[in-house]
Amino acid sequence: MIQFNETTKTFKLDTKNTTYVIAICDEEQFLGHAYYGAKISDADVAYLLRTEEAPFVPSKNNRDRSSFFDTFPTEYPGNQVGDYRESAIAVRDAKNHEAVQFVYCGHRITDEKPALKGLPATFAPKGEVMTLELDVADPVLGLEATLFYSVFEKEDVITRSITVKNASGETIYLTKIMSLSLDMDQEDYQMLTLHGSWARERQMDFRNIGYGKQSVGSTRGESSHQDHPFVALVSEKATQESGSVYGFHFVYSGNFLAQVEKSQFDSLRVQMGIHPDNFCYQLRPGDSFVAPEVVMTYSANGLGQMSRNLHDLYREHLIRSPYRTKERPVLINNWEATYFNFDTEKLLSIAREAKKAGIEMLVMDDGWFGYRNDDNTSLGDWTVNENKIQGGIKYLVDEVNKIGLKFGIWFEPEMISPDSNLYREHPDWAIAIEGRTACRSRNQYALDLSRREVVDYVYESIANILRSANIEYVKWDMNRQLTDLGSTYLGKENQGELCHRYVLAVYELQERLLAEFPNLLLENCSGGGARFDPGMLYYSPQIWCSDDTDAIERLSIQEGTSLIYPLSTMGAHVSDCPNHTVGRVTPFATRGNVALAGTFGYELDITKIPEEDRAQIPEQIERYHKYNPLVRGGDYYRIASYRENHMYDCYEVVAKDKSEALITFVQVLNRPNYHSRRIHLYGLDPKKQYRIEGEDKLYYGDTLMNAGILIQNMWGDFQSKLIHIIEGGN
Ligand code: DGJ
């Protein structure tokens, strides 16, 4: 619900459990941010702007105008006009000035969610969402903007974005544009971010908020392994299921900044948007810029409720794929099985064995094209290597289909190897700065996707392969980050647009692909999970979570990922042991149980693994089919975290109708002479009776939640257990 009160000049945005209040303030029509948090009844909370306290609003005290701006909780702070905290927007105008300040001009309240041109964004049918469009302007610059706020009532989410338009007669350069700026008082909040690296993505990291600015960000051209476009403010007292948590998540796949600043008056300014480093966008008269969307949610019930709000939002209002609510085929990917060393016969032998075990799709990974036998060559040459794939793609796919499996394929469309025919023909298609030795990474360059002909070449290369055979799945990889930001195509005044244009082109390519192949199952990937972000979810219902497939390492990677993403999106496979990344040996059953929390599949040479492992695959697949509807669509609860207790990990998924739940328990540290562990379940109906599958006894939900159950110590390393709770005596 969104209401405007003419008398108090306040906008009140309500979701089921939260309220957000904006107030128009003073004669100059500044927009102030009055409140965001648990639901309140009064709209008139403009007193929270403290405009009746010294230094007072400019109309009452213009001699201290700067002090006013430096303390005022601003809805969208300008630059160089008295507020010394971080600005949300900055420009360079025709006179080389950088000042901007927006004031309120008008507004609209609608019952729909406008799309963001060229960008992924949440959506909802008309009537299921409300949007406030606040028009603001800087009359000195002739810059106009609209701030968008969409209210997803049921999910307790408000999304924000901004579009700016150069309504002046001269060119303006946009040098910074945050999609979110939110001022609030510091109470007892800590900052939670997701940090990482290759093979250990999205590790939860809490820190105290000190005076000044603290941030995470990426200037790597993608959302990155290293930091994640997410930040939460978490009350020190908050637990999984109680206490205040504000979550902010950026629907974008490129450079980002997520920053919290604590001011001299102990207020906080939270900001999120495209990273201003290396960013400068030319706006000629009449040009507009659309900034990507930020998702905000507030939970008074701890981190768990934040997770569930985001999971529901993404499942219902961000993922578009027809696979969104469908069970994904159980796939086997040949990467860890063969790396580059495979041919048609090897793939068919894997397919035959896979079919016997109940696997449903074979994915051919890197190494099938050009003359690629290692990672040094051929990116950009998207023609099949018939020395390896004897008989060609169509023959291979037909044979795999005859065996009874679907077929999927790997691409890395954005890249070019220096040793490729494409590079020899078009060296200027790589991102590079003339005269400077461009950094190679994995011996490759990134393509200059700001160039139309490059985008078209890339599209046709992929589409031609897909048109040539019955290919039902694509893994879209990206194995290097951007450096040497130069484009021989863009003019000198447009070089600062390269990173954003690159991301827009990736979006355009995936959009085109899905338009031509609407039933394609697309899985995004970037050297593991470096582009696991909400932007990519708009195109692919699943994303490869990490190249680390070790069941124990996966616990914290999947904990950090499931903190903000639905389990249905997490690419997770069972791989061989010793694990290829860490050398650990874990039971095959545990590898299966951990992968069940995600999309589920295999990444091993099924023709070579020990017979006792192979024999477990049919049961694992049966379990996947049995539990996946629950895992995909249910409510996620974190019961215990190995990250915190260093001994065991435990999480639960509860059906929306509370008729069943699945608990996964992984014992990481096995110590002698310990009591059994008590775990408390969550999210059940306290008055319903449940049975633990395999036992006869009935328990009320309140017993399972308050008194809990006991998990006995298990014999051996890295043992695990699935516990299925079913309503009633069935
Ligand atoms: C990185 C991916 O994460 C892997 O799964 C694999 O596809 C390799 N790239 C192939 O080069």
Image (spheres, helix red, strand yellow):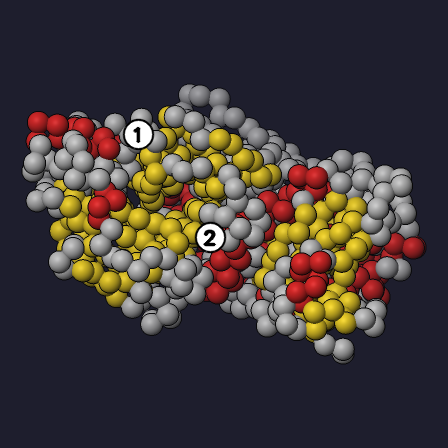
x and y, in percent, of residue 298 in the image = 43, 52
Q: Is residue 99 above or below residue 515?
A: above
Q: Name the residue under label 2.
A: 300
x and y, in percent, of residue 299 in the image = 46, 52
Instruction: Identify the residue at horizontal 76%, vertical 40% (top origin).
Output: 647
Q: In this view, does 719 lie above or below 400?
A: above
Pick the residue in front: 582 or 73: 73
Instruction: Identify the residue at horizontal 30%, vertical 60% (top origin).
Output: 41
Question: Tag 2, which secondary structure?
Answer: loop
Instruction: Identify the residue at horizontal 76%, vertical 77% (top origin).
Output: 729
Question: Tag 1, which secondary structure?
Answer: loop
Pick the residue in front: 261 or 700: 700
Query: Tag 2: residue type?
Result: Ala
Instruction: Identify the residue at horizontal 27%, vertical 58% (top origin).
Output: 42
Toward the right, the furthest residue is: 611
Quadrant that contains the N terminus: bottom left
Query: Tag 1: residue type?
Result: Phe
Q: Mark 1 points at which residue?
A: 265
Q: In this view, does 679 lie to the left or right of 257?
A: right
